[in-house]
Amino acid sequence: MEVFSLKKMLLWLMTLVIIVSSTAECREPVLHRVGGGKYTWAPNANFTAWAMHETFYVGDWLYFGFDKTRYNVLEVNKMNYDNCSDRNFITNITRGGRDVFNLTVARPYYFLSGHGYCFKGMKLAVYVQYAPPDPAPLSKKAGMLNKRTWNCKLSPATLATAGQEQLRQRLPHHGLKMSQMCPQTS
Protein backbone atom coordinates (compact mmCIF):
# COMPACT_ATOMS: atom_id res chain seq x y z
CA MET A 1 0.00 0.00 0.00
CA GLU A 2 2.81 2.39 0.93
CA VAL A 3 4.71 1.63 -2.32
CA PHE A 4 1.61 2.52 -4.33
CA SER A 5 1.42 5.95 -2.67
CA LEU A 6 5.11 6.49 -3.44
CA LYS A 7 4.45 5.72 -7.09
CA LYS A 8 1.53 8.11 -7.04
CA MET A 9 3.70 10.82 -5.48
CA LEU A 10 6.41 10.24 -8.08
CA LEU A 11 3.87 10.49 -10.91
CA TRP A 12 2.51 13.72 -9.45
CA LEU A 13 6.03 15.12 -9.10
CA MET A 14 6.97 14.29 -12.69
CA THR A 15 3.74 15.90 -13.95
CA LEU A 16 4.58 19.03 -11.97
CA VAL A 17 8.10 19.11 -13.42
CA ILE A 18 6.75 18.86 -16.97
CA ILE A 19 4.24 21.65 -16.39
CA VAL A 20 6.78 23.97 -14.77
CA SER A 21 9.44 23.28 -17.39
CA SER A 22 7.03 24.08 -20.20
CA THR A 23 5.82 27.35 -18.66
CA ALA A 24 8.80 28.71 -16.73
CA GLU A 25 10.75 31.61 -18.17
CA CYS A 26 14.36 30.57 -17.75
CA ARG A 27 16.19 33.62 -19.05
CA GLU A 28 18.47 35.63 -16.84
CA PRO A 29 17.66 39.37 -16.72
CA VAL A 30 20.05 41.70 -18.53
CA LEU A 31 21.28 45.09 -17.31
CA HIS A 32 21.24 47.52 -20.25
CA ARG A 33 23.50 50.54 -19.77
CA VAL A 34 21.53 53.28 -21.50
CA GLY A 35 23.70 54.73 -24.23
CA GLY A 36 26.20 51.90 -23.86
CA GLY A 37 28.46 53.30 -21.15
CA LYS A 38 28.67 53.98 -17.44
CA TYR A 39 27.67 57.68 -17.55
CA THR A 40 26.06 58.12 -20.95
CA TRP A 41 22.65 59.63 -20.11
CA ALA A 42 23.65 63.06 -21.41
CA PRO A 43 22.66 65.56 -24.12
CA ASN A 44 23.54 65.15 -27.79
CA ALA A 45 23.46 61.35 -27.72
CA ASN A 46 21.38 59.24 -30.08
CA PHE A 47 19.49 56.96 -27.72
CA THR A 48 17.16 55.86 -30.52
CA ALA A 49 20.10 54.38 -32.44
CA TRP A 50 21.41 52.74 -29.27
CA ALA A 51 18.00 51.17 -28.48
CA MET A 52 17.72 49.77 -32.02
CA HIS A 53 20.75 47.56 -31.31
CA GLU A 54 19.34 46.23 -28.03
CA THR A 55 16.59 43.71 -27.35
CA PHE A 56 14.56 44.29 -24.20
CA TYR A 57 12.70 41.51 -22.41
CA VAL A 58 10.42 41.43 -19.38
CA GLY A 59 12.63 41.30 -16.28
CA ASP A 60 15.54 43.23 -17.82
CA TRP A 61 16.89 46.40 -16.21
CA LEU A 62 17.85 49.81 -17.59
CA TYR A 63 20.82 51.56 -16.01
CA PHE A 64 20.96 55.37 -16.30
CA GLY A 65 24.29 56.95 -15.35
CA PHE A 66 24.29 60.76 -15.23
CA ASP A 67 25.06 63.96 -13.32
CA LYS A 68 22.11 64.17 -10.93
CA THR A 69 22.67 67.89 -10.32
CA ARG A 70 21.89 68.63 -13.99
CA TYR A 71 19.71 65.84 -15.36
CA ASN A 72 16.92 63.53 -14.31
CA VAL A 73 15.11 60.49 -15.67
CA LEU A 74 11.34 60.51 -15.93
CA GLU A 75 9.07 57.79 -17.24
CA VAL A 76 6.39 59.46 -19.36
CA ASN A 77 3.57 58.51 -21.70
CA LYS A 78 3.92 58.52 -25.50
CA MET A 79 2.40 61.98 -25.97
CA ASN A 80 4.78 63.57 -23.44
CA TYR A 81 7.67 61.68 -25.05
CA ASP A 82 6.76 62.96 -28.52
CA ASN A 83 6.37 66.54 -27.22
CA CYS A 84 9.34 66.46 -24.79
CA SER A 85 7.01 67.39 -21.94
CA ASP A 86 8.00 66.57 -18.38
CA ARG A 87 4.57 67.49 -16.99
CA ASN A 88 2.44 64.73 -15.49
CA PHE A 89 5.21 62.14 -15.68
CA ILE A 90 4.48 58.57 -14.62
CA THR A 91 7.55 57.93 -12.45
CA ASN A 92 10.62 59.93 -11.47
CA ILE A 93 13.33 57.29 -11.28
CA THR A 94 16.07 59.78 -10.40
CA ARG A 95 17.76 58.85 -7.14
CA GLY A 96 21.50 59.32 -7.22
CA GLY A 97 22.70 59.52 -10.81
CA ARG A 98 23.29 55.79 -11.10
CA ASP A 99 19.72 54.64 -11.29
CA VAL A 100 18.07 51.44 -12.47
CA PHE A 101 14.59 50.74 -13.75
CA ASN A 102 13.04 47.26 -13.95
CA LEU A 103 11.11 46.47 -17.13
CA THR A 104 8.31 44.42 -15.59
CA VAL A 105 5.67 44.37 -18.35
CA ALA A 106 5.79 43.68 -22.09
CA ARG A 107 4.93 47.13 -23.48
CA PRO A 108 6.60 50.31 -24.75
CA TYR A 109 8.35 52.46 -22.12
CA TYR A 110 9.20 56.13 -22.65
CA PHE A 111 11.82 58.11 -20.74
CA LEU A 112 13.14 61.65 -20.94
CA SER A 113 15.15 64.22 -19.04
CA GLY A 114 13.27 67.36 -18.08
CA HIS A 115 14.32 71.02 -17.94
CA GLY A 116 14.61 71.19 -21.75
CA TYR A 117 17.26 68.47 -22.05
CA CYS A 118 14.82 66.25 -23.92
CA PHE A 119 15.08 68.70 -26.84
CA LYS A 120 18.84 68.02 -26.81
CA GLY A 121 18.29 64.30 -27.34
CA MET A 122 17.83 63.03 -23.79
CA LYS A 123 14.87 60.78 -24.50
CA LEU A 124 14.55 57.04 -24.88
CA ALA A 125 11.83 54.67 -26.06
CA VAL A 126 12.20 50.95 -25.43
CA TYR A 127 9.88 48.21 -26.58
CA VAL A 128 9.80 45.35 -24.10
CA GLN A 129 8.75 41.88 -25.17
CA TYR A 130 8.29 38.50 -23.56
CA ALA A 131 11.36 36.26 -23.55
CA PRO A 132 11.66 33.90 -26.52
CA PRO A 133 11.14 30.17 -26.02
CA ASP A 134 14.03 28.39 -24.35
CA PRO A 135 16.47 26.38 -26.45
CA ALA A 136 16.64 22.61 -26.01
CA PRO A 137 17.76 21.81 -22.44
CA LEU A 138 20.53 19.37 -23.36
CA SER A 139 23.91 20.36 -24.73
CA LYS A 140 26.11 18.10 -26.85
CA LYS A 141 28.52 17.38 -23.98
CA ALA A 142 27.44 14.15 -22.28
CA GLY A 143 23.87 15.32 -21.77
CA MET A 144 24.83 18.05 -19.28
CA LEU A 145 22.18 20.67 -18.61
CA ASN A 146 22.55 23.93 -20.48
CA LYS A 147 23.24 26.65 -17.84
CA ARG A 148 21.40 29.43 -19.68
CA THR A 149 18.29 27.33 -20.15
CA TRP A 150 18.02 25.98 -16.63
CA ASN A 151 19.29 28.92 -14.57
CA CYS A 152 15.84 29.73 -13.20
CA LYS A 153 14.54 30.87 -9.86
CA LEU A 154 12.61 27.61 -9.60
CA SER A 155 13.95 25.25 -12.22
CA PRO A 156 12.53 21.81 -12.95
CA ALA A 157 15.82 20.34 -11.70
CA THR A 158 15.28 22.12 -8.37
CA LEU A 159 11.77 20.71 -8.11
CA ALA A 160 12.96 17.22 -9.00
CA THR A 161 15.73 17.39 -6.40
CA ALA A 162 13.25 18.54 -3.74
CA GLY A 163 10.88 15.71 -4.66
CA GLN A 164 13.70 13.18 -4.63
CA GLU A 165 14.71 14.31 -1.15
CA GLN A 166 11.20 13.65 0.13
CA LEU A 167 11.19 10.24 -1.54
CA ARG A 168 14.68 9.49 -0.21
CA GLN A 169 13.39 9.88 3.36
CA ARG A 170 10.69 7.23 2.82
CA LEU A 171 12.40 4.69 0.56
CA PRO A 172 14.77 2.98 3.03
CA HIS A 173 11.72 1.48 4.76
CA HIS A 174 10.88 -0.45 1.58
CA GLY A 175 14.35 -1.69 0.70
CA LEU A 176 14.43 0.36 -2.50
CA LYS A 177 17.40 2.39 -3.62
CA MET A 178 16.96 5.94 -4.86
CA SER A 179 18.67 5.06 -8.15
CA GLN A 180 15.90 2.56 -8.85
CA MET A 181 13.23 5.23 -8.66
CA CYS A 182 14.78 8.51 -9.83
CA PRO A 183 17.93 9.38 -11.76
CA GLN A 184 20.32 11.72 -9.99
CA THR A 185 20.27 15.37 -11.07
CA SER A 186 23.53 17.21 -11.27
Image: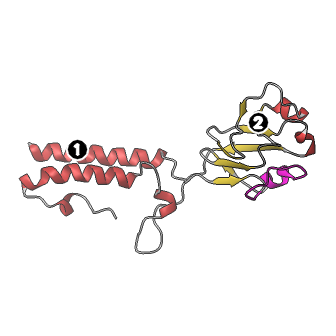
Residue sitting at x 34%, y 45% = 15
Please identify the residue farthest to the top as the structure is shown.
88
x and y percent of residue 27 in the render? Answer: 55, 53
The residue sitting at the bottom extreme is 141
The way the protein has been coloured in the rendering is: secondary structure
Query: Three-letter amino acid code at disc 2?
Result: Leu
Measured from the top left, where is residue 157 in percent x and y? 37, 55
Q: Quadrant of the N terminus?
A: top left
Q: Which residue is mark 2?
A: 74
Q: Is residue 14 left or right of residue 73?
A: left
| In this view, 97 is above or below 142 | above
Q: Nearer the viewer, residue 137 or 104?
A: 104
* Element assignment for label 1: helix
Horizontal side of residue 177 vs 35, given as left or right? left
Does 129 sit above or below residue 185? above
On-image quarter of the C terminus:
bottom left
Q: Residues within 10 Å of mark 2 (few under 14, many from 20)?
A: many
Amino acid carrying label 1: it is Met
Quarter location, residue 87: top right
Comparing 108 with 68, the one in front is 68
